[in-house]
């Protein structure tokens, strides 16, 4: 059994630290392959006129939500390249969904990631949301540099030893 460091804050064991407190990648080779699924969500807050331009597809850089969807999919597939201790996974599905909403003007993002693997896909779902939000910002910044990204968080997950997790919704933010 691999060595595990104790959390000095009195919480659960920290599996990504060796006995000396150095970061390490956890060995998941002995775990069984199971179905994994995670949903993450996030929000990009913007001026109402920026949101209207996104809806009208009238921004100079083009189809904001279409490009953000592709960026989120690509980012989920590249998560181990972004997050040093993440394992490369065999993802079976990545979906991104966008909702526009008024008062406050915002774009809500949800990512769903599925895999059959030895470890969860929470980080892939979160990475997809982050990349989509950053892409929205990039494509709209010429008309609105005051956009705010957040909150971003895990909405639910299924599979794995820790079992299911669900949150009702992310906290609201008022820019």
Image (spheres, helix red, strand yellow):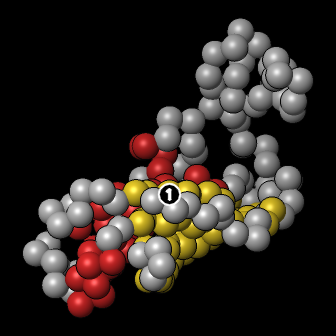
Callout 1: SS: strand
Dot 1 crowding, Cα within 10 Å, few <14, some 14–19, many 20+: some
Instruction: State the image coordinates of residue 21 (x, y, percent, origin top left).
Output: 69, 14
Q: Nearer the viewer, residue 155 or 160?
A: 155
Task: Name the residue located 55 percent from the left edge and 61 percent from the top edge.
Answer: 173
Residue at (23% x, 82% y) in the render = 53
The residue wearing badge 1 is: 150
Residue 137: x, y in percent? Answer: 30, 61
Residue 33 sits above or below residue 110 on the image? above
Is residue 142 rendered to the left or right of residue 159? Answer: left
Q: Is residue 24 left or right of residue 135?
A: right
If the image is split into quadrants, where does the C terminus sit?
A: bottom left
* Whether residue 102 can be seen here: yes
Q: Residue 140 lies in what quarter of the image?
A: bottom left
Residue depicted at x 40% and y 57% = 148
Residue at 24% in and 57% down: 145
Quick one: 35 or 60, which is closer to the camera?
A: 60
Whether residue 1 can be seen here: no
Q: Residue furthest top?
A: 20
Residue at far bottom of view: 56
Residue 89, placed above or below residue 54: above
């Amino acid at each position: 059994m691999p060595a595990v460091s104790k959390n000095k804050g009195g919480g659960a064991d920290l599996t990504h630290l060796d006995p000396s407190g150095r970061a390490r990648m956890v060995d998941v080779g002995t775990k069984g392959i199971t179905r994994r699924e995670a949903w993450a969500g996030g929000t990009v807050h913007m001026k109402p006129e920026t949101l209207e331009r996104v809806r009208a597809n009238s921004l100079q850089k083009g189809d904001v939500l279409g490009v953000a969807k592709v960026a989120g999919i690509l980012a989920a597939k590249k998560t181990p390249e972004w997050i040093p201790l993440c394992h490369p996974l065999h993802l079976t599905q990545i979906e991104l969904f966008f909702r526009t909403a008024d008062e406050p003007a915002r774009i809500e993002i949800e990512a769903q990631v599925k895999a059959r693997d030895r470890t969860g896909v929470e980080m892939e779902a979160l990475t997809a949301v982050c990349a989509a939000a950053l892409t929205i910002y990039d494509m709209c910044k010429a008309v609105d540099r005051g956009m705010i990204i957040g909150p971003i968080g895990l909405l639910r997950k299924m599979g794995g030893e820790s079992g299911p997790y669900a949150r009702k919704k992310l906290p609201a933010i008022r820019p």
